[in-house]
Every structure is written in structure tokens, then in C-alpha cells.
Image (cartoon, rainbow, N blue to C red):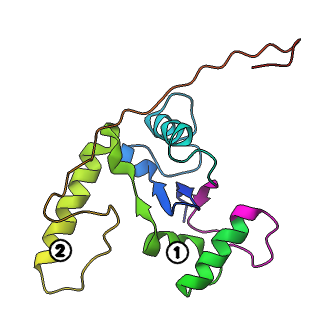
Amino acid sequence: MDEYFDWVNIDKKQYICPGDFGQGNYRFDSSCRGNVVLLGVRDLLANEWQGCKVLFMGDEKDIPEGAENSALKQLYDQTVQNGTPGKGYDTQVATYWNISGFFAAAEVRVRREIIKYLEALDGDAPKPVNEYGVDVSDPYGGLFLREGMEFRITLNHSKKVG
């Protein structure tokens, strides 16, 4: 089985899923320059995710209890609070908010997922996780409004400035 990756903000308990943007969820699918997922990540990092701990996290990697990295330590503590020690992906799915729907590039897939969620609320089956934070009275309010950002940086190697 292959490992799927999401861009995860440990501090804000938010993530974006490359699959929602029509990109693959494998490690290299959303890492090429100029793709819509990275435009969204750059937008978030320049704005509300600025200064936050952000990981490109796979769904198969357990978080070690004695991790030295501060982001992994924080994530491990969250997994313990969630009752799934070391299971970062399980904690992400259960307690984080998927904010892919903020971006226009994710509209087709996110809209489809929200429709499935709303339909599932009407049945007798157990209620699904509200991964996109949908307000049932206004399920698409505030969504699909952002385009993402592209950065171009000029470096002067002789002066060591950017």
C-alpha cells in the first residue's frame, strides 16, 4: 500500500489535502513548482499559518514518543490526548479541520464531498466526521474564495541577501 500525504498545521489543527485539489496524495505528486496545492500552502504560510509548525505528513508513519523535533513532540502529545498514542494520521482525521475548501482549485472535489456529508446526515447510519467544518445552514459559505500565491525570490549570493 502507498503512503498518502497532507500538509498539516500542528498549531492550528488544520490541513489541506492534495487530493482535494485534483493532485495525487503521494509524496511527489504535489511537490512540483507551481502546482495548485503548493500555491495554497504558500498562501497559508504567508498569512494565517505564518510562524506555525507545518508538516508534510504521511498516513503510515507513527510519531515516536521521544521525538526531538518540537512539531513531532507537539503532535505526539495531541495523539495521546486523542487516545491514539503515536498515531498522527488518526489524530489528524479525528480532530483537525480540512481547509482545502478555502481554495477555488479544490471546489469540484470538496463540493462533491460536502454533498456526500450532507446526504449522510439524513440517514440512520452513524454521523460522519465533519472534516470540512460544514455549517449545515450555509454549507458553502466562505469556501472557494482563495487562489493561492506564487513567490519569486531573487538571491544575491555575493551579498548573501534575498
Expressed as whole percent of the image width and height from the top left, the position of residue 59 reads 56, 66
Q: Earlier in the sequence, mark 1 or mark 2?
A: 1
Identify residue for label 1.
91
- What's under tag 2, amino acid-wise? Ala
Q: Residues within 10 Å of mark 2 (few under 14, many from 20)?
A: some
Q: Residue 95, can we see it? A: yes
- Mark 1 closeness class: few <14, some 14–19, many ≥20 residues within 10 Å: many
As drawn, which residue projects farthest toward the right? Answer: 158
Residue 94, image x, y percentages: 44, 75
**To which quarter of the image does residue 138 belong?**
bottom left
Quarter location, residue 31: top right
User: On screen, 32 above or below 63?
Assistant: above
> What range is drawn magenta here?
53-71
Quarter of the C terminus within the rendering: top right
Look at the magenta stretch and give its main secondary structure: loop
Q: Nearer the viewer, mark 1 or mark 2?
A: 1
Q: Using the numbered discs, state the Cα–Cα distance from disc 1 to disc 2 in whole angstroms.
A: 22 Å
User: Which residue is more in the foreground, 53 or 94?
Assistant: 53
**Left or right of 6 on screen, residue 118:** left
